[in-house]
Image (tube, helix red, strand yellow):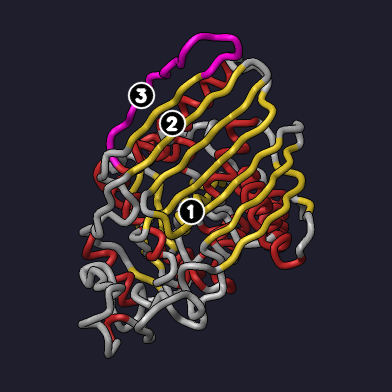
Amino acid sequence: MKKVAIVGCGLRIIAFAKALKNTYHQTHTIVALMDNDPGKMDRFAKWVELSAPQYTDFDKMCAETHPDLVIIGTTDVFHADYIVRALDKKIGVISEKPLCINAEQCLQIREACKRNPEVFAVTSHNSRYRPVAQTLKKVLASGVIGTVQSVEYHELLDRVHGKSYFRRWNSRRKYSNGLQLHKSSHHFDKLNYLLDSYAVEVTGSGSLIAYGANAPHEFEGTRCCECAHKEVCPDFFAYNEKLYDKDCYTPDMCIWSKEIDIEDTFSASIRFANGVYASYSLCAHADYEGEIINIQGTLGRVEARQLSYKSQAADVHNMTTVPEESIKIFRFGGEGVEEVPIERGEGAHGGADAKIFSELFAVPPAATLPSIEDGIQAVLTGAAIVRSMQNKRAEKVQI
């Protein structure tokens, strides 16, 4: 029986906790919760109906509960510290994405892995497990479009999901280093996975267009729950008090705040080690949600779409909305379009969560899981894009 400690009791980790309780209880048991926000941690425990000791001190938690494995889902900037401390205590690590937020933290994690090569450590990049990504991987491996030459990847966040990042700590660069890390690291990992390569150079540009103090808006405050305009503001957001203690965690900060200092729109040109070029873009204020991936090869082209046109306020991550999913192959010299069947999964993120959990919590864990190095490479790509935007030049993807 593996003893598991949860470090960081956020929304994303609820899925892990429920999976451990309901599906993997015969092989894993949650022995502790840890968060620097006791109110949020207590709400988390009640939400998942979990009875476990609660801590605000990592070392004390480890000394008293002796976990075999920690699942890290804290604010992004703190991931690296807990990863390194866990590895040096010989405790296995599952880190939510992004693995960390900059190249310096990547180096700290890489050195910790070198010191502790026998310790299990992976990154929870579930986006590569989505049905479209899994099917795309098989299409590329079949050779039907020949050698890949270029990729176009467009990520769209609708005005429910997109706004959510600007209501929370994610919108402050010191905590997240921007959506290039917090959101797009998933996509950079997916590109690395699909192309069997890593990025080596990027050029990026972008801006804060739809949110923040300089965007067009009528009302402004600090937090929705305290705002004088909450009765009339069209952007008022009432968070779920069953999940969060309103005196601690703040998921309802004003999306027009002067403190917002990340981009809501950006694009990047990415050169990979295997010679492939990719263009990537993210828009966090679109009318619909999803992604479009077009891959050009020497023998043809494959076009993948994973889109949701109907957003629900309660479905921030489009986890219940049934999306439009399609993969089409266009062979050079061929006639018509070939539709590729997609084997859809069940549950959150198109079945991706269930699939990655089945590998994370297998005994032993699957060898195909995204490694710590996979997480590092995704972070290095995002961090290089941020540097490129700041320095207005191409940047190497390296530590």
Foreground: 301 or 195?
301
Left-right relation of 161 to 292? left
Q: Mark 1 highlights which residue?
A: 96
Amino acid carrying mark 2 in the image: Val
Residue extending farthest bottom: 228
Q: Crowding near pointer 1: few (<14 within 10 Å), some, many (20+)?
A: many
Gap in Å between the C-alphas at discs 2 and 1?
21 Å
The circle on residue 132 is: 2
Mark earlier in primary sequence (3, 2) = 2
Q: Give the residue displayed 54% in from the left and 69% down from the top.
A: 208
Q: Is residue 42 above or below residue 92?
A: below
The verdict on residue 282 being magenta is: no
Left-right relation of 61 to 105? left
Quadrant housing the C terminus: bottom right
Amino acid carrying mark 3 in the image: Glu
* Helix, strand or loop for disc 1: strand
Foreground: 214 or 165?
214
Amino acid carrying mark 1 in the image: Glu
Mark earlier in primary sequence (1, 3) = 1
3 and 2 marks in contact (CB < 8 Å): no
Q: Give the residue displayed 58% in from the left and 43% down from the top.
A: 189
Q: Magenta region's main secondary structure? A: loop
Mark earlier in primary sequence (2, 1) = 1
Q: Mark 3 highlights which residue?
A: 343
x, y (%) of residue 330? 53, 18
1 and 3 marks in contact (CB < 8 Å): no
Q: Which residues are magenta?
A: 330-347
Q: Is residue 167 above or below residue 79?
A: below
* Helix, strand or loop for disc 2: helix
